[in-house]
Image (cartoon, rainbow, N blue to C red):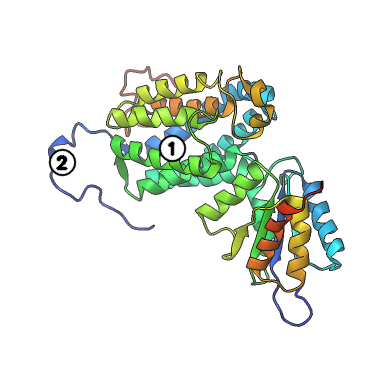
Amino acid sequence: MSGKVTNGGAGGSGARDEGAQRLDAAFFARWMRTAADAVRREADRLTELDSAIGDADHGGNMRRGFDAVRAELDEDVPATPGAVLMTAGRKLVSTVGGASGPLYGTLLRRTGKALGDAEQVTGEELAGALRTGVEAVAQLGGAAAGDKTMLDALLPAVEALADSGGTDLGAARAAAERGAEETVPLQARKGRASYLGERSIGHRDPGATSAALLVAALAEAGQVPSGEADAAGGTGTEGGA
Amino acid sequence: MAAEGSKKRVGIVLVSHSKEVAESVARMAAALAGVPDAPVAGAGGLPDGGLGTSEELITEAAHRMDEGAGVALLADLGSAVLTVKALLAEGDELPAAARLVDAPLVEGAVAAVVTAAGGGDLEAVAAAAEEAYSYRKL
C-alpha cells in the first residue's frame, strides 16, 4: 500500500500516451464531490420515488453517506484513484444505513480495488474496473438486468463506456439515464419493492435513479481536464472569486 | 463472560433493522435456552436508535461475542443481510471465523443459542439455525 508504483512499465504504447486521458486521484475526488452535490440536490426526489415503492429513506440515506464521503475527502484526499474509491466506499457502508450502503460501498470498493495502486489510470482501465465493481454489486444483491434495481442504470453505463474504449463518459451518462427511465414499466424483483408485485410497475426505481446520478457526476468530473481543475481557470471559465 | 470451565462458545449476533427487535430476540433466545449469560447480542438499527443497519454496531457486537470459537450472524432482511455480506466479502472488520447463517431470525436465533450454549461448534450452530426453516407451523 505504501510506495510508488510507476504506471505503464510495459513499452509499446508510448506513442499514444499523449492522446490518452490520464485520470488521477484529484479526478476521482472530484467525481465523489460532484456526486455528493447531485445527491444533495436530488435527495427529495429520491425519497419521493422511494416513498412510492420503498420505505422513503433513499434520499436521506444517500445524502448522509455522500456528505460523509465529502467530509472525509475534505480532510484528506488519498494519493491514488483506487484509494479514493476504496475510502469512499468504506464510508458509504458505514454511514448510509440502508441497502444502498453495502451496494454502493461494494461498487466503489471493488472498482477501487480493481484500479490497484497506480497513481493515474486510463479511461479504459476505469471502464474495466467499473465493470468489476458492477459485477460485485450484482453478486452481492443477487440481482440481474431487468429486476428494477440500480443495475438497470449501471450495466448499460458500463457497456457504453467500454464500447468507447473508456473515453466517452457522456455516453455512459446517457445510457445510465436511459436505463433508469426504462425501469418505469418494470416489475421489481429485488428489495422491498418486490413485495409490491405488480404494484411496483409504473414507478421509476429510486436505486437506478441514484445510480444514474453517480454516473452523471462521473461525466461532469470528466469535463474538467484533470490537473488543471484546481489550478487556474484554464477551461474558459471566468475566474470570479 | 466465558462459560464455566474454559470451553469457548460460538458467539451469535442478531442483525435487525430495529434495535428493539434485535435486543428482544437476543434476550428471548437466551431465556428460552435457559442460559442467561449466553453469548448472544443484538445489533439492530442505527447508532442513534433509528431504523436501519449499522456496520459499526454489527462489527462491535461480533467482537464482543467472539470467545474464539467463531461468530454466527443472523439477519432479518434487505440491508441487514447485504451489510453483513459486504462486511464478510470486503474485509477484516469482522472476527476471522464469522459467518452469515441463512436462517429465519427468531426461530434461528433460538436454535443457534441452544446449540451454542450446549457446546456446539460453528458448523453445528449454523446447521441448527438453518434447520429452523423446516419447522412448519401448519
- Of all residues, the one furthest to the front in this rendering is B138
Q: Quadrant of the N terminus of chain B?
A: bottom right
Residue B75 coordinates in the image, percent (x, y) = 68, 50
- Identity, as a three-letter code, of the amino acid under mark 1: Ala
Whether discs 2 and 1 lie on one chain: the answer is yes
Q: Does the image show residue B99? A: yes
Q: Residues within 10 Å of mark 2 (few under 14, many from 20)?
A: few
Number of numbered discs visible in the structure rendering: 2
Q: Residue at x 82, y 46 (%)?
A: B138
Q: Residue at x 33, y 57 (%)?
A: A3
Q: Secondary structure at mark 1?
A: helix
Q: For this rendering, which residue is in front, A140 or A161?
A: A140
Q: Chain of mark 1?
A: A
Quarter residue A176 falls in:
top left
Q: For this rendering, which residue is in front, B121 or A21?
A: B121
Which residue does the numbered mark 2 point to in the structure image? A13
Quarter residue B78 falls in:
top right
In the displayed structure, A68 sits above or below B103; it is: above
In the displayed structure, A114 sits above or below A154; it is: below
- Identity, as a three-letter code, of the amino acid under mark 2: Ser
Quarter residue A51 falls in:
top right
> CA separation, marks 2 and 1?
27 Å
